[in-house]
Image (cartoon, rainbow, N blue to C red):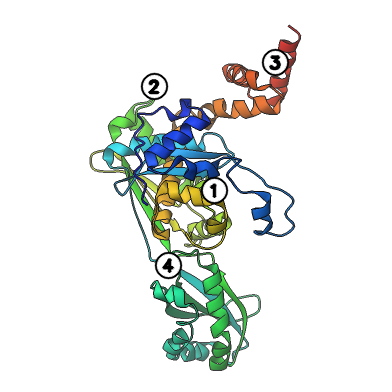
Amino acid sequence: MPSKARNSGAVKFYNLSVEERLRVLADESGLQEGALQAFTAQGGLNVEQADHMIENVAGLHALPLGIARNFIVNGREVLVPMAIEEPSVVAGASFMAKLARPAGGFFTHADPPHMIGQMQILDTVHPQEARLRLLEQKERLLDDVREIDPLLKKLGGGPRDLQVRVIEDSPIGPFLVAHLIYDVRDAMGANAVNTAVERIAPAVEAITGGRVLLRILSNLADQRLARARCTIRLADLGFDAFTPEEVRDGIIAAWAFAAADPYRAATHNKGIMNGVDAVVLATGNDWRAVEAGGHAYAARAGRYTSLSTWGKDAEGNLIGTLEMPMAVGLVGGATKVHPTAQAALKLMGVQTAAELAQIIAAVGLAQNLAALRALATEGIQRGHMSLHARQVAIAAGAPAELVEKLAQQLVQEKTVRIDRAEEILRAWQNQ
């Protein structure tokens, strides 16, 4: 059932205990409180379940799961689970979502869930002629894979197109590449696509007289893009001693650096992926595939650049956009096996993979804004420091009752280092 989330900020969520937060989430989402027990150690993935997921299981590896709040996506309130170990990401995304609310939040859309299955065709006598032969037989080849997944066909999925090109310049000389475009509906799609290209490979060989070597999904899912945009009102951009115009123009200038320079773009896009990966991971999807597709898409013009854009509208408000491949699913894989992933999807109230992709794009844009705003004003370390200081305090061996006190002193001294934390602890112990 879709989420009826009410997370406008009336509840000081960060001040609650973990147990109280779960109760608030259940109330805000309309779910039974028990549906969210998978977020706890007692209700999450166990070793027996993990043993069926991968090989050589010897235990579990946990990550913190936070809830990004304040998100409105296409007019709907959304509670967003994020699995990540880095401090300030969940808080940053939540605050940027709050800034976007007065102008309607995030507006998103996504392409149909079309994935690409590649076939590398070697040893053709005349690659250009072989290309035309394949295109002449396109409908026959598509017909060959329409029936291989009856359930997918029933849901409206299946083959959509066959595209063929010649790679002229490669270390082994010219060869053909065929792309099978396949609608995978609410799946990420790897298994369906790989099965389809395996099925038609013998027919492709017969038509071209060549040899099909690789038959594999491409993670550059550029026919399955998700897009998000938002407006931040100029009046909401003031910060400390910075005027709204200074903050806006600083954000735009920081983005321009990433748009022009691949060294900056790498870190800029990493900030986007801080938000994207955290939601992809929380929902049991393949964050490595999304990462690979995103970074490849950022370099599609021959130079690596920003996945986002920032500018201003006629009224001087800040405008942001994000466009990137987003191959995520609701069925298959860990999304159906991992109890925490299932609970995360229930909390979000998503009904389709496209809807999930759009929410993820919105979170990526919000997190990008959080990083740019920090860089353009206080610097990335100041906002990050207090949260990071807690981790340093724990790493230095502070007992639970002293973690907050030690973290506050480290921040006050502006020396958030383990050696200094250990020194303070020793001094306290000797008092």
Mark-to-mark CA distance, 1 and 2: 42 Å
Q: State the separation of the CA atoms marked 3 and 1.
A: 39 Å
Residue 173, above or below 2: below
Crowdedness near tag 3: few (<14), some (14–19) or many (≥20) residues, C-alpha within 10 Å: some
- Image coords of residue 355 (percent x, y): 38, 56
* Image location (x, y in percent) of residue 298: 49, 57
Above or below, 4 relative to 115: above
Q: Is residue 314 above or below residue 141?
A: above
Secondary structure beneath dot 1 equals: helix
Is disc 4 surrounded by few (<14), some (14 to 19) or many (20+) residues within 10 Å?
many
Residue extending furthest toward the left: 315
The residue carrying mark 3 is 424
Q: Which residue is depicted at the point 64% across and 54% down?
A: 49
* Disc 2 residue type (three-letter): Ala
Question: In the rendering, which numbered label is found on residue 185?
Answer: 4
At x 42%, y 48%, the residue is 348
Q: Say left or right for 82 vs 419.
A: left
| Upstream in sequence: badge 1 or badge 2 | 2
The residue where tag 1 is placed is 340
Please say if the residues under marks 4 and 3 sit with CB atoms less than 8 Å apart.
no
* Discs 4/3, front: 4
Q: Quadrant of residue 23?
A: top left
Residue nearest the observer in this picture, 219 or 56: 56
The first of marks 2 and 4 along the sequence is 4
Residue sticking out furthest to the top = 431
